[in-house]
Amino acid sequence: MTTPPIELKPSSHPLSDAERDAILASPGFGRHFTDHMVVIKWTEGRGWHDAELVPYAPLSIDPANMTLHYAQEIFEGLKAYRHPDGSVALFRPEANARRFQASARRLAMPELPVDLFVAACDAIVRQDEAWVPAHGGEESLYLRPFMIASEVGLGVRPANEYLFLVIASPAGAYFPGGVKPVSIWLSEDRVRAVPGGMGDAKTGGNYAASLLAQAEAAAKGCDQVAYLDAVEHTWVEELGGMNLYFVYEDRIVTPTLTGSLLAGITRDSLLKLAGDLGYTSEEGRVSIDQWQADSESGALKEVFACGTAAVITPVGTVKSARGEWQQSGGEPGEVTLKLRKALLDIQTGKTADAHGWTHPVA
Ligand SMILES: *Cc1c(COP(=O)(O)O)cnc(C)c1O
């Protein structure tokens, strides 16, 4: 497969410096988008073609577009950070590219070559570099690569035309007032994904499946839902959009990738980073009974969630139909905060990157 070059067709009317600075002063998350987007087409028989960087603009969608009816859609999320020397780097974009290929396979979509995925991310960051916050903190430019079917028709089958896009949105610090633990609703009835389903693909459908449980959790005063496995309703899997870690003294444990949970890149980075800080890391099974019992006995010191958006979020309160308990006294744990700082220091270029994870955007 040949990789087409990305043709640059930049906007003739980007936002003024003053307008952009006003947004960057308080960007929030996913509310504002930069001046450009990358669009690449795929057609059966032709492969990837017409790779372009163009002004950010609405798409024109036929009402019978196949994505609107059968949800062939996958996405990624990754961040560009401003380093202290003013340069900009992405965090592990090749890992996102490979996961995007795995998601594509699961949804019977074409695989985008890794180098084209990374080139598309580089192109938008380079063009919209002024949108990468430079406050010296956790702020970033969040990239959202995604792919949709672009064929028109109501027949049920894999489409034979697709669009790949990358859009970019400045993101503020997730915890502007300091790291704050989240409360978790442990769902024993609703499930996110099933064995053989698409829980290990990053697709909008999994998020659609999680929204009702999320709304129920909110009604119970919780921030997030933790899902159990769909067969035994026993084994802790993950949150709707973040993986989980359990901290036992100097050992951190995350649920094994069984096929129904997503292989987070933050999760994987922490498995590797733990050793640098003198902790051991492992994948294993944690049951809901064990979570509760070990919390109550004090053996389980801390629990945290992790993902690109929030990096690491401590878990404070846990609620379920069987009761409620406080994790680490409802305070952010020491190991949680140490890991969070170590990972962010690599991402933001404040420490040397011994793992080769940062990808400079020249
Ligand atoms: C994206 C995502 C994560 C976190 O993955 P990262 O690569 O760490 O951002 C975890 N769970 C689900 C369901 C996700 O969609």
Image: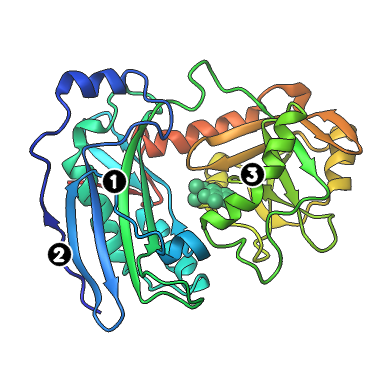
Q: Earlier in the sequence, mark 2 or mark 1?
A: 2
* Label annotation for residue 211: 3
> Colour mode?
rainbow
Residue 219 sits above or below residue 255 on the image: above
Which residue is drawn at the image coordinates 27% and 25% (left, top)? 134
Q: Earlier in the sequence, mark 3 or mark 1?
A: 1
Residue 98 sits above or below residue 31 on the image: below
Looking at this view, is 330 or 2 the one in front?
2
Mark 3 residue CB less than 8 A from any atom of ligand 1: no
Looking at this view, is 55 or 347 the one in front?
55
Q: Quadrant of the N terminus?
A: bottom left
In the orientation shown, which residue stands out farthest toward the top?
A: 177
Crowd band around label 3 with a 10 angstrom C-alpha radius: few (<14), some (14–19), many (20+)? some
Residue that badge 2 annotates: 5
Mark 2 residue CB less than 8 A from any atom of ligand 1: no
Looking at this view, is 16 or 112 the one in front?
16
SS label for mark 1: loop
- Distance between the Cα atoms at labels 3 and 1? 25 Å
Q: Is residue 69 left or right of residue 118?
A: right
Amino acid type at mark 3: Leu
Which residue is drawn at the image coordinates 64% and 44% (left, top)? 211
The x, y position of residue 71, in whole percent, is 50, 62
- Distance between the Cα atoms at labels 2 and 1? 23 Å
Mark 1 residue CB less than 8 A from any atom of ligand 1: no
* Label annotation for residue 58: 1
The x, y position of residue 230, in whole percent, is 78, 60
| Closer to viewer: mark 2 or mark 1 | 1
Looking at this view, is 92 or 34 the one in front?
34
